[in-house]
Amino acid sequence: MTKPFLILDSKSTKGRIAVAVAVVIALLFIWFGVRLQIGNMLAELTSPNQDNSVEVGSFAATLSPHDPLPRWLVATKQKQIFSPESTVASLENFEKAVRLAPNDFRWWIELGRALEQSDRPEDAEKALRQAVLLAPAYTFPRWQLGNFYLRQERPDESFAELIKTAEKSTVYRDQVFSLAWDYFDNDTAKVEELANSTPESRASLAKFYASRSRPKDSLRIWNMLDDGQKAQNASAAKVIAKILIDKVLFNEAVEFARQSGSDPDARSETITNGDFENPIAVTEDSLFGWKINRTVGGVDTAADSTVKRKGTRSLKTTFRNFEKPMVYTIHQTVSLETQGSYRLNFWVRTENLKSGGPPFLEIADCRNEKVVKSSIPFPVGTSDWQEISVEFIVPEGCQGIVVRTTRVYCGEQCPLVGTFWYDDFNIVRQ
């Protein structure tokens, strides 16, 4: 049986009193609720760097006395003033924030920082350890505790915490490696103690070494992964290859490019796809393959399966009233040993090639694009396949050269028409 609703007679004295009490309770509830929200909002929207942040935080604390955020705002601003009075007041407000939210690790971290700055390391350690205890699965408290131990010159305890940070967070992993790198004066053995045996951690360490211009160490760590793990971290290998290329460290970059799948046929001291039997990539993923500049007007370059020296195809370039003084339509980066002596061989065929400035092949230093050596100009008119060789020495400190096609300068408006074919590039160390 449904119970009847309680009906108040608002005309009676008891009824009027009951309605008035209900209204008052509702208004009080709304008032205190609004005060709490306003106090929290003021504290949240106010930066500690504002000049009036202490005043705003204090007012917010009166509106929302049980909210730790206003106390944190006031304490943070007071900490920036650097006076004995402000330091004491700042600690008091951080402690109030902790008392108001004792189970929130963030306030314990803030208190720990303030205690350390106040030269109270034992109390700071307790506060930071409490933060770790409250959030054992979070990396940030351990990161703070590890850095605290490092500042206190307690490296064993520091890196015990930082190792756990590196295990769980890719965000902090590089920072942990960087801390150890600087603290242990570039000691790779010490840094590697912080990297666990997971593929992700080793890939991160390989990338870290690449960014520190340690390509051999980068490749050494990378090669600790098996083929399956390398495949899972192929994107990291691509990033490492680009880092090393930017640092003109081509000898190891070519290996990362090969293993990442960007250039699976790339090798040091080798022209990639020198016979043009494989398709030429049209994306920027290829770092050591042929690149064709298809934005240059009046020049068409493509594989040709009808004319070839041997195999199934060659590379054909046709000029249609091309007049620009320079052209770098076809080029490739090659990893070589510094100061090595090499001979580049390739074959050329021409058809109706006419110009006072015919094409030729140029070898340039990857670091600064300075010309190292040039081939003879390609035969004008029509000629059958002809082998051309270029002997050169890699400049000191250089690990890579660019093989590129250009033309003999013959003025700002010097027409170039006709066709030439490339085939069978190879490079030999002498």
Image (cartoon, helix red, strand yellow):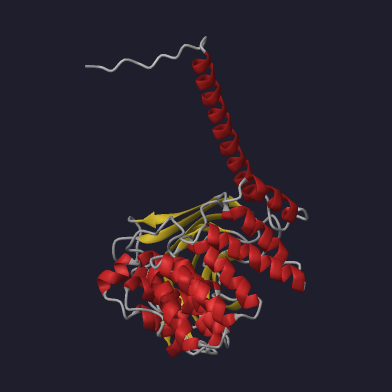
Is residue 273 depicted above or below 44 in this figure?
below
> Looking at the rendering, which quadrant does residue 69 occupy?
bottom right
Q: Residue at x 38, y 17 (%)?
A: 6
Q: Is residue 119 left or right of residue 385?
A: right
> Who is closer to the viewer here, 308 or 356?
308
Is residue 308 depicted above or below 341 in this figure?
above
Residue 149 screen position, x and y as percent: 52, 82
Is residue 119 depicted above or below 40 in this figure?
below
Q: Is residue 121 visible?
A: yes
Residue 180 screen position, x and y as percent: 50, 83
Q: As drawn, which residue projects farthest toward the top?
A: 11
Q: Residue at x 58, y 68 (%)?
A: 111
> Looking at the rendering, which quadrant does residue 162 occupy?
bottom left
Q: Is residue 175 visible?
A: no
Q: Is residue 178 left or right of residue 132?
A: right
Which corner quadrant holds the N terminus? top left
Q: As drawn, which residue projects farthest toward the front?
A: 13
> Who is closer to the viewer here, 67 or 406?
67
Is residue 50 depicted above or below 375 in this figure?
above
Q: Is residue 87 left or right of residue 252?
A: right
Residue 46 screen position, x and y as percent: 68, 50
Which corner quadrant holds the C terminus? bottom left
Q: Residue at x 53, y 68 (%)?
A: 404
> Who is closer to the viewer here, 352 or 404?
404
Residue 16 screen position, x and y as percent: 53, 16
Q: How many marks?
A: 0
